[in-house]
Amino acid sequence: MEGFFSELEPFYPQGGRPPVGLETMLRVYFMQQWFGHSDPGMEDAMHDVTRMEQCLHGEEKEIYGDKGYACRKRKEQAESQGVAWRVLRKAARGRKLICADASFNRKSNRTRARVEHPFGVVKHLWGYRKTRYRGLRKNAAQVYTLFALANFYMARKKLIAVAG
């Protein structure tokens, strides 16, 4: 495989954004072809920080995100506007995370795990990993129903105790 990439390397464009490796870019392009993803969709998967900034409306009171969104400049800008920066903390390159930051991340991850659990139930227990387009209302109704059922599923032990 190494020979294949070394043949293509001279033709790989340089400059612009910080470069993404040739092998990674080929994987992205192949995924686009195999699964019919659009260019912006795959680009967002690699560079979704720029998409996050487009989603902010300017009236946020708090901003949450994982380590991929950590940026000192964005943090200072948010805090100067009175916005609480709740993005997970990252250690400096080559250093360990300090205790206060590790504690913050642990506390945040507990909350995130509770929020992510229904997605795991819907995706893994009921196989809702891909959806066919059937209209926005029908798809929305199905997803709302699945998450309502996921809440019942997660509370099943308490519900059985109350009923029985």
Image: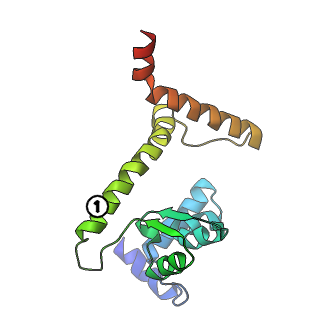
**Residue 92 shows in this picture:** yes
The residue at which mark 1 appears reads as 103
Measured along the vertical axis of the image, is residue 135 above or below residue 65? above
Which percent across, then down, holds residue 17?
53, 84
Q: Nearer the viewer, residue 63 or 67?
A: 63
Screen quadrant of the N terminus: bottom left
Q: Nearer the viewer, residue 11 or 53?
A: 53
| Residue 90, percent from left and from top | 34, 71
Residue in the picture at 74% in, 36% down: 138
Q: Callout 1: helix, strand or loop?
A: helix
Q: Amino acid at mark 1?
A: Ser
Residue 146 found in image quarter: top right
Q: Residue at x 63, y 31 (%)?
A: 145
Residue lying at the far front of the rendered structure: 82
Residue 68 drawn at (x, y percent)? 44, 69
Q: Is residue 119 left or right of residue 107?
A: right
Q: How is the image coloured?
A: rainbow
Crowding at label 1, few (<14), some or many (≥20) Cα neighbours within 10 Å? few
